[in-house]
Image (spheres, rainbow, N blue to C red):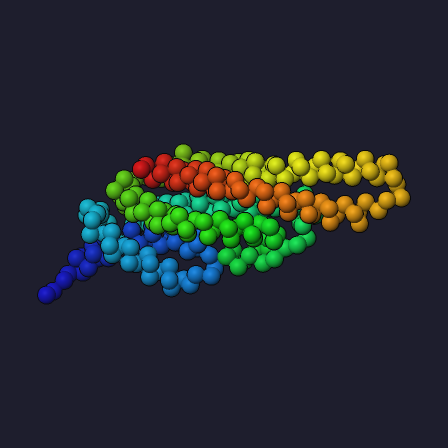
Amino acid sequence: MEFSEAEITRFIQQYFLPFVRIGVMFLVMPVFGSRIVSPRVRLVLAFLITVLVVPLLPALPSVPPLSWQALFFVAQEVVLGAAVGFTFQVVFQMFVLGGQFMAMKMGLGFASMNDPTNGVQTTVLSQFFLMLVTLMFVAVEGHLVLISLIVDSFHTLQPGRFVFASSNFYEIVKLGSWMFAAALLMALPVITSLLFVNIAFGIMSRAAPQLNIFAVGFPFTLMCGLLLIWLGLTHFSEIFETAITYGFDQVGRMLKL
């Protein structure tokens, strides 16, 4: 069998654009996008999914491989894959930010550790919530749902036949305001309760100036904060479900599913 150069080029193009979309999503999305997952694992997974998906797709537009049009198609696939993965990164960072709010109010802002998934310093409380959310996300097979969404997107947004609208960029920017609002709402019970505790200690310091409020108030505030977080874990699944559902809805609207 003999293949011409044009046929080989079309064959590579048929697989390359879907591979870019899936591969970029794996680089950015939670769980697979963390530093603890080898880049080789991401590439192998993206390649296997591409091999399974491409035979189900219609023929992609054939363009010269070294042209501005081909570069534009690749750029669109990169942006779309990164947007899908980044959306769920924002959802996960909402829990990290909520842990930061609680830790600062409890006096645990100095108790920080290295986050192995992102390579940055976070508080111990934020790391606890991030680990909890990651385990719950994998337990409910959220990563498989996200992969199925990106696979279904090849039917609604076929490579080379769509334009990533500016409204999608605006929706991604709006995720920032949602992240801060949702994190504050998550930490609000702990913050409000500890505010009343601090007010009580302020009244005690005025009534008895000789009392060492720092020596008494710091461990008491810390214990109250840990108790409130423990009590709040009974409703954590509802917060998780709301946040994950919002993330999937955003991805679905972005992919026109």
Q: Where is residue 147 in the image (x, y as percent from the top left)?
A: 34, 49
The extreme top residue here reads 167
The extreme bottom residue here reads 1
Residue closest to the eye, 11 or 177: 177
- Kindly identify the residue that appears in the image at 39 percent across and 45 percent down: 84
Q: Where is residue 121 in the image (x, y as percent from the top left)?
A: 60, 55
Q: Can residue 88 be seen in this view?
A: yes
- Kindly identify the residue that appears in the image at 46 percent across and 52 percent down: 135
The extreme right residue here reads 210
Image side of residue 29 versus residue 225, left or right: left
Please state, as top left, top right, bottom left or bottom right, where the N terminus lies in the image: bottom left
The image quadrant that residue 40 belongs to is bottom left
- Kindly identify the residue that appears in the image at 66 percent across and 44 percent down: 225
The extreme left residue here reads 1
Image side of residue 121 versus residue 71, left or right: right
Q: Where is residue 227 in the image (x, y as percent from the top left)?
A: 64, 45
> How many discs appear?
0
Q: Can residue 180 be seen in this view?
A: no
Image side of residue 135 versus residue 210, left or right: left
Vertical placement of residue 80 versus 118, above or below: above
Residue closest to the eye, 122 or 84: 122
Image side of residue 62 versus residue 29, left or right: left
The image quadrant that residue 105 belongs to is top right
Please state, as top left, top right, bottom left or bottom right, where the C terminus lies in the image: top left
Q: Position of residue 184 (x, y in %)?
A: 58, 37
- Kindly identify the residue that appears in the image at 29 percent across and 55 percent down: 49
